[in-house]
Amino acid sequence: MLYLCLTIGFLVDQQAFAQTPSLIICKGSSVNYKEFNEPGSLPSVAWAWKFQGGNPGTSSAREPQNINYPDTGLFITECTSTFNNGTTSTKSVYVLVIWAAPEPIPIKDTSLCNPAVSLTLNAGNNHRGWSYHWTSSDVDLSATDTNNRTLGVQKAGTYNVKVYSKCAVTSKTITIKLGEVPKVNLGKDQFVCRNTAVGLDAGSGNGYKYQWAPTNENTQTIMATTAGTYRATVTSADGCSAYDEVNLIDSCPPIVHIPNTFTPNGASPNDLYRPYLEGFVAMEMRIYNRWGEKVFETLDINGAWDGYYQSKEAPEGVYVCLIELMGNNGFRQVHKTDITLLR
């Protein structure tokens, strides 16, 4: 009986022959092939090689040299030998070409703001023929998880992954830590009077950043000069944020003073007619002449009459003013008074 066997050599820096029916090589590597017969077989006199995925793709040499494999994949090599009695025999081997150079491992140091850690680390390099091994100096890892491309993480700590094949090896170590979450306490709500300025402090910390609303300031402390709700958002150097709010409540009773005379003559003061208000949030003011005609109306709490009616100077005389006010305490006031216009 006639037999044909193949031996194949893997070229990296020098020729190396290995008598094996299959081979794993790196992308871009070359192979030396060698045909031989088992003892007792007839001598072969001709050879026809086919190299799937190889360059060149064919050869008639007995021992083809430097067959290069530029792409990854699983390829078959066939050799048909013709013996001196005219008979032939075909043998084949499979060549697995794997990715040669490792890619950068995408994991990186991470700070988490939530103590309930739940992460999946991915070593990348998802190629046939590559292996992975995870270790940690801080966390006991399950043996079933350490040899996968990904690793589920439930605890903070230091993690290392080794990515390797017969072509290359690389590794990376990262640290997952619980970031600092700032503690922000602006204190209890406060009662203020006449918008008295109040100092607010969001607390100090290394690398803290601050954002206040509604003032849009970015300092640790501010002076709140008006009643209202203030919020401080603080972000630590680890990127973790927290906030607190405080209400400054104007608790003083509203004050109103309604003048009874004004002089719209172009000479200050008293060119405009308006009430003096403190502690009010809304106003409606209407002014009527002696015939009951409405000569002025405003809903602006800062509104004022300039002494004109229908684009003309209103005549001197006595007018009736009706003012409805809403205080910051939620109570409504209505005032009626006579005012005298003098020029």
Image (cartoon, helix red, strand yellow):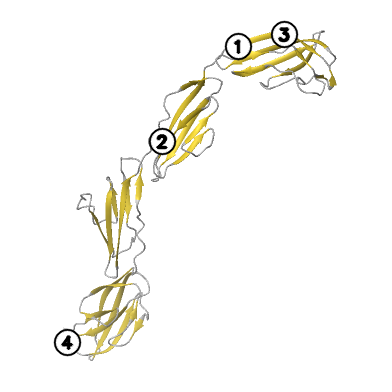
Does 10 sit left or right of 234 as displayed? left
Among the two numbered marks 2 and 4 on one chain, the one whose residue lies closer to the N terminus: 4
Q: Amino acid at mark 2?
A: Gly
Among the two numbered marks 2 and 1 on one chain, the one whose residue lies closer to the N terminus: 2
Residue named by callout 2: 203
Residue named by callout 1: 332
**For the residues marked 3 and 1, what is the alpha-carbon distance in whole angstroms?**
17 Å
**For the residues marked 2 and 4, what is the alpha-carbon distance in whole angstroms?**
91 Å
In percent of width and height, residue 341 lies at 80, 14
* The disc label shown at residue 41, or none: 4
Q: Nearer the viewer, mark 3 or mark 4?
A: 3
Q: Amino acid at mark 1?
A: Arg
Tell me if mark 2 has few (under 14), some (14-19) or many (20+) residues whose alpha carbon lies within 10 angstroms of its own.
some
In the picture, the quarter occupied by the N terminus is bottom left
- At 37% from the left and 74% from the top, the residue drawn is 70
For label 2, the SS is: loop
Circles 1 and 4: CB atoms closer than 8 Å: no
Q: Nearer the viewer, mark 1 or mark 4?
A: 1
**Where, by quadrant of the figure, is residue 334 drawn?**
top right
Among the two numbered marks 3 and 1 on one chain, the one whose residue lies closer to the N terminus: 1
Circles 3 and 2: CB atoms closer than 8 Å: no
Q: Amino acid at mark 4?
A: Ser
Residue named by callout 3: 337
The answer to whether residue 222 is above or below residue 6 is above
Q: Amino acid at mark 3?
A: Thr
Tell me if mark 1 has few (under 14), some (14-19) or many (20+) residues whose alpha carbon lies within 10 angstroms of its own.
few
Q: Nearer the viewer, mark 3 or mark 1?
A: 3
